[in-house]
Amino acid sequence: MLFHSSIRKELARSFGATLIVLVTVVMTMTLIRTLGQASRGSFNPSDVMLVMGYNVLAFLPNIMTMGLFVATVSTLTRMYRDSEMVIWFNSGVGLGLVLRPVLRFAWPVLLAVGGLALFVLPWSYQQIEDMKSHYENRGDLERVQPGQFQESGGGSKVFFIEKSLMAEQTASNVFIATNEAGKETITTARSGRVVTEGEDRFLVLENGQRLESQIGKTALRVMAFDNYRVLADQGVLGAAPEVPLNTVPTLKLLQDPTPTNLGEIAFRSGFALAALNLLIIALAATRVNPRVGRSWNLVFSLLAFQVYLNLLSLGQTWVATQQVSFVGFMVGLHGGVLLLGVAWLYKRHHNLGVSWLKRATTKKVAA
């Protein structure tokens, strides 16, 4: 049918353009935020682009949901503005019949949103947490950069080297300041090299001196040495870090249906349902009013999307704190919005107004 093919083609063009714009905006904002985190030492600066890519993947359910909603609103707005919808209405095509070609175009997008939210989103966050944890837990020697004073992971040592040959694991003009067990020491050496023994790594210093003092005392002990070994990294496993909830796979959450896990499931599964409901609302709400202006539909779509997204976040908290049940939230929010959208679409399809409601009420009273 000509009507179906034309509206699907225009939806595809509008959705593609909207998606490109939204992805570009999100990438720019994510890049700025990731650069800030890297400058504070949360990530390896060389991993900035990789972290940005994982963040964009995690935002894709939001981006695609909003892109589909905005594309539908903008397409229908253009058709109303150019009187194309009037022509189709006069040809016997009601507003309710527009839902079929829109759903035929949107169902792959809805499936993609659901798959991304349920499976790709936690995987992306897990990759980001792994890189962050690996960088934060790197060894003291890996933190050292030539020409920079660098504090150790525990904060008890400060390293400085003038030059370094990473391939040979050697350095020149080494400076180490420590504050451990009530002692302050300053060690300097002309050169040093890294030696690995089992899971421990030692820094072997050559041709230097060591100054040692007790905290709170004035006595100072000075020693010169030809060869001195310093324990740099010790292979001791720390306590297992707390796993963020957004990194847990969906199947694992389903196996342990605690209130907190159910709240996360409600948040993830809500994206696909929200995309479907917003699609119906876009059909029911979009129209052109010359007195309001052409931008009203776009403003409405942005506000509706933001309100729905905020309700998803609030619902996650409510389910996690047992203020509302999982089923009650899913039925109340998504089912309620679906009924509202279908009723609104039915009203506009049959051109029902206040006068129809008065007549129906009058007939019921008379009967």
Image: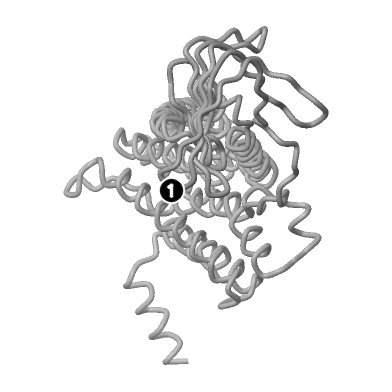
Say which of 92 and 236 sits in front: 236
The location of residue 361, given as percent across then percent down, is 40, 84
Q: Is residue 12 above or below residue 301?
A: above
Quick check: 239 left or right of 140? right
What secondary structure is found at the residue carrying circle 1? loop
Q: Is residue 332 above or below residue 35?
A: below
Q: Is residue 176 above or below residue 301?
A: above
Q: Amino acid at mark 1?
A: Lys
The location of residue 203, given as percent across then percent down, is 65, 23
Quick check: 203 left or right of 40? right
Residue 104 visible: no
Say which of 285 and 2 sits in front: 285
Residue 101 visible: yes
Residue marked by disc 1: 217
Quick check: 45 left or right of 232? left
Say which of 221 and 94 sits in front: 221
Q: Residue at x 61, y 66 (%)?
A: 330
Say which of 38 and 28 sits in front: 38
The location of residue 290, given as percent across then percent down, is 19, 45
Q: Residue at x 34, y 34 (%)?
A: 78
Q: Residue furthest left?
A: 291
